[in-house]
Image: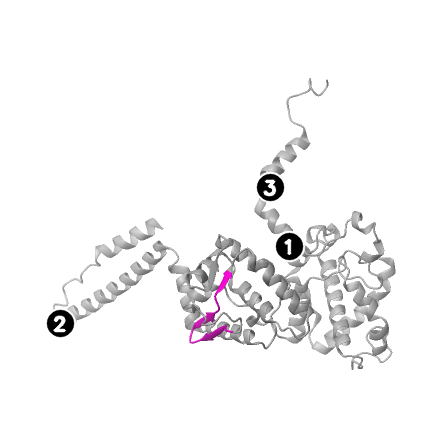
Amino acid sequence: MAAAGGSSSKRTWVVDVEKKLKEADKSAEVSRWERHCIYQVPPCMTNIKSKAYQPQVVSLGPFHHGDRDLRPMEEHKHRALRQLLLRANRPLDDFVAAVEEVTEELEGAYMDLDNEWRADGGGRDRFLAMMIFDGCFLLEVMRCTAADGKQVGDYAHNDPIFSPHGILYMVPYIRRDVLMLENQLPLLLLQKLVEVESGKPQDDNAIIRSAVELYEAGIQFKPSKTLSLHDIRFRRGTLSMPTVSVDDSTEYMFLNMMAFERLHAGAGNDVTGYVFFMDNIIDSAKDVALLSSKGIIQNAIGSDQAVAKLFNTISRDVVLEPNSALDAVQRQVNGYFRQPWNMWRANLIHTYFRSPWAFLSLAAAIFLLGMTIMQTVYTVLQFYGGDSNSPPPSAPSPILWVIYTVQERR
């Protein structure tokens, strides 16, 4: 009754909720959830067997950092960082600067990250230090494990973790902890650390441009003479690819064939490499439309967007086999694309030929330049061949009208 007879003003919490509803941005929410890739397992799952989700010897990332049973490993993380810095012959500041560039992306990888680790909570430096220590430790464990039982020169022969004895008896426990969902490090972190250590940026040839971008750079597409996945070739600016029919069964076919290649030793990497290649050149429906117009894709499932989504989805966690024939094709295409003339051509098309008014503006500017040159030549000839006291002719008014009209319409 008191509420019914109260003031007509809205409650504070109602006003706050209505304000948040108005400010809610659906696209921002989608991008926010897409960044998450490392999660905390909810109690409804851990109740089955909580030990299966908890690291036993080492914490990687923020979710188990500082756990009492895992603290002894922190000393070994410091030693791993010191040895990595000595071997790389690079100052710590270089690693800090590289990781700091992507700190927001690293924070976004963790769902429900506590505020003590975030920049707005004053924990940016603490988060940055943890990422570097944990990342360098994991890289050193991987390096020593790859030594296949041999002594790694920059560690003591009796090192409890990084010696052959430690690799044999301690790394199996570390490897188990690395598999824990809550005990993960973003791949981006390891890539940045490796780039600084090796002094080499990520290989630009690992990713190929989209079909539309390649086409704008002058690369032509045409169907191969056969349907073999081996018949993908790049020659004289033309990329030849086998025609693929995309229907309702295509997704299941590719997924099962890729699973067979992963599980059966000696099966090769042909289908997996092809799917990886198609995912790289297909970013949107425009790429599918272009490939369809060239006879490379036969779309039997409807929209071009559905085809793009299919290849982008089934290619998750897929990699291209190094030094394969398809890897060589990808490098050839990237090399052609990066040639100065082709890059200039692509930029010209993207900037001036996507919009008719941008093209008209460019044409008008060229026309104006030509008329200005003609006027200058005419003035010079008149000065030396005729009466030097006569005034030069005025600029043609139609040119100014064209420029004005184009600019107004843009």
Residue at mark 1:
35
Q: Secondary structure at mark 3?
A: loop
Q: Residue visible at 65% across and 57% down?
A: 104
Q: Which circle marks residue 305 in the picture? A: none
Q: Bin the neighbour count of mark 3 within 10 Å (Cα to Cα): few under 14, some 14-19, many 20 and up.
A: few
Left or right position of 96 against 69: left
Q: Is residue 73 above or below residue 168?
A: above
Q: Position of residue 288 (x, y in %)?
A: 48, 59
Residue 197 colored in magenta in the image: no
Task: Quote the CA–CA distance across marks 2 and 3.
Answer: 73 Å
The secondary element bearing badge 2 is classed as helix
Which residue, given by chain and number where applicable, does mark 3 sit on?
24
Classed neighbour count for the residue bearing mark 2: other residues with Cα under 10 Å, few (<14), some (14–19), many (≥20): few
Q: Earlier in the sequence, mark 2 or mark 1?
A: 1
Closer-to-camera residue (311/266): 266
First reached walking from the N terminus: tag 3 or tag 1 = 3
User: Label 2: which residue?
Assistant: 385
How far is mark 2 from mark 1, CA to CA?
Answer: 73 Å
Q: Tell me if residue 267 comes above or below residue 294 in the rendering.
A: below
* Residue 159 coordinates in the image, percent (x, y): 85, 76
Q: Secondary structure at mark 1?
A: helix
Write down the region rendered in magenta: 231-245
Q: Amino acid at mark 2?
A: Gly
